[in-house]
Image: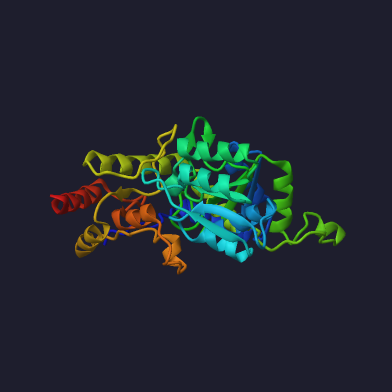
Amino acid sequence: MILQFEPVMFKSYADKVHAQIMSSWVGLGPKVKEFENLLGSYINTKHSIALSSGTSALITALSAIGIGYGSKVVLPNYSFIAATNALRFLGATPILIDINEETLCLDFELTKKFCENNKVDAVIFINHNGYVGTNLVNIINFCKEKNIPTIEDAACALGQWYKGKHAGTFADIGCVSFSVPKVITTGQGGLLITNNDSLAQRSREIVDQGSTTWRKDGYHKNFGLNFKFNEVAAALGIAQWDRIEEIFKIRQNNYERYSEHGLKLNYYSTDKLNGPWMNVLIKVDAKLIMDELNKHKIQSKMYYRPTHQSIGLNTLSYPVSEKVFKETLYLPSSFNLKNNDIDLICDIIGEISG
């Protein structure tokens, strides 16, 4: 069976995790700070805060910029449900906007039109499949002109750069994920990144029960939750970071191998060839190809169902999202995928396409 994705673990990872466990320091500590510093230095951001999940990073980021009950926040209708759920958790209203068919990200013209005619409290740009490019820059610049706070959900965009800036650093505050299928995984986990001192301070309070000093003075002056990261997960992340260039190279090689067969893959823009998050086949009959690959014990997936359908808003119409869902297929993209596997997958797709 060729899986759509599976994590690859090495003994060196287990050794570092074992050493951390045997140190008896498994909660929040210096290993978390080391992990934050590694990622922060690479991404080139002033503040990097590790959290328990990418979703907790989104909730923290939204809370830090003042999003709460009754807030109206624009985000794309085609993406993973996490950002929508973070808004609903806070009592905010998700304003779903259709996507750009080429980037699979928030459509600039539709976003601009809505924001010019309605009160908007924030905009979430989701870097679908690691996309960074002109579409992102246009939206961020427009929001700055309108004084609309921005969040970049760069969950799957670790390693993606555009004009010298890393994904997640274009907006006021950004979020990265370390869940199982991400570029590096700590099982679950997230990273909040920002160059804004006040947003960083408020975020650190939210992550740790409303205060960064309560262990010393006993006061919890602000509202917060427990979204802290831990030493064991940090040790696993650091172990993978030692091989990050190898991981990027494998991702890029897989992308190029698929492309050499003439497959039309999802566009992503980057200054560095680190490969997209997943190899995404576009503008095909996704269900037909998925079923045929499955007959050969090859797993692929149709991501994502348009959010308005997923949460039951079926009376609304988002033509691009609905079209993309039917025409987009996530192909096998594991680090241990062999060239022969890719060749087989492409041969099968080629036979279907005629």
User: Picture coordinates of residue 102 (x, y %)?
Assistant: 36, 43
In the image, taking residue 44 as reference, residue 81 lies left or right, namely left
Q: Residue at the far front: name it.
A: 117
Residue 1 in the figure: left or right of residue 162: left
Q: Nearer the viewer, residue 227 or 327?
A: 327
Please state if 65 lies on the left or on the right of 142 as rendered: right
- Residue 309, given in percent of the width and then of the height, sits at 42, 65
| Location of the N terminus (image quadrant) | bottom left
In the image, residue 37 lies at what x, y percent? 63, 42
Residue 88 quadrant:
bottom right
Measured from the top left, where is residue 273 in percent x and y? 40, 35
Question: Given the current orientation, which residue lies at the most extreme bottom position?
Answer: 312
Q: Residue at x 22, y 52 (%)?
A: 345
Q: Nearer the viewer, residue 53 or 147?
A: 147
Residue, far right: 217
Q: Is residue 248 visible?
A: yes
What residue is shown at x 41% (from left), y 38% (from top)? 274
